[in-house]
């Protein structure tokens, strides 16, 4: 089913479960339904909805670029890079499909502490963030090898 499939199923399930309520899971974690017409943290959110199709197109272009990158990695090795890119692609595809179908991204995970709360997010956002962190970690881990190779092979 993949990241995008799990994300879309979870979003539809949470819409049914959380239609009129919020469910506290832990003192800092709740399930709470929200709809984001913008991007991360609600940037570019506008009730007019002008941003729907430009954001869908941008997401599709990014996904296509990442898929090209993924297919150009060596067939053996680079497992962490492949996993990172697959997480990002799956998350971006899930959010793009949600936005294309409904004009917004469905969010349902809420982190909070006392009066502070993080903007609601979803499974796709977690996959994108985890993939990005893994990609940075892989690239940082690889950098010293590249530098030492450059010094030994001028």
Image (cartoon, helix red, strand yellow):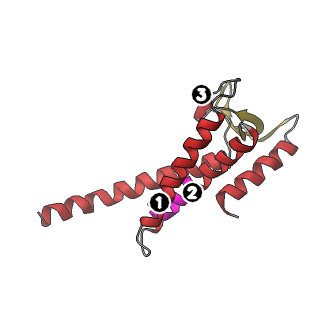
106 relative to 147, above or below: above
Mark 1, secondary structure of its residue? helix
Name the residue rendered at 26%, 58% in the picture. 144
Residue 86 colored magenta? yes
| Displayed quadrant of residue 53 | top right
Please provide percent x and percent y for residue 150: 17, 61
Q: Is residue 102 left or right of residue 121?
A: right
The residue tagged 2 is 87
Q: Are marks 1 and 3 in contact (CB under 8 Å)?
A: no
| Displayed quadrant of residue 36 | top right
Marks 1 and 2 sit apart, C-alpha to C-alpha, by: 14 Å
The residue tagged 1 is 68
The quadrant of the rendering that contains the C terminus is bottom left
Name the residue rendered at 66%, 35% in the picture. 52
Label ID, residue 44 = 3
Mark 2, secondary structure of its residue? helix
Q: Nearer the viewer, residue 82 or 148?
A: 82
Marks 2 and 3 sit apart, C-alpha to C-alpha, by: 24 Å
Comparing marks 1 and 3, which lies closer to the viewer?
Answer: 1
Mark 3, secondary structure of its residue? loop
Please provide percent x and percent y for residue 75: 44, 74
Which segment is the magenta one?
80-89
């Amino acid at each position: 089913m993949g990241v995008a499939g799990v994300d879309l199923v979870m979003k539809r399930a949470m819409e049914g479960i959380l239609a009129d309520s919020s469910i506290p899971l832990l003192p800092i974690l709740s399930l709470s339904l929200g709809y984001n017409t913008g991007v991360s943290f609600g940037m570019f959110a506008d009730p007019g909805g002008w941003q729907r199709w430009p954001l869908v197109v941008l997401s599709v272009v990014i996904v296509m670029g990442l898929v090209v990158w993924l297919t150009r990695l060596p067939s053996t090795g680079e497992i962490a890079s492949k996993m990172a890119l697959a997480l990002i692609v799956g998350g971006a595809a899930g959010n793009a499909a949600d936005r294309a179908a409904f004009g917004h991204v469905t969010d349902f995970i809420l982190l909070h502490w006392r009066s502070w709360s993080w903007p609601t997010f979803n499974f796709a956002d977690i996959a994108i963030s985890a993939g990005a962190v893994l990609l940075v970690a892989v690239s940082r881990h690889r950098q010293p090898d590249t530098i030492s190779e450059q010094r030994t092979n001028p």
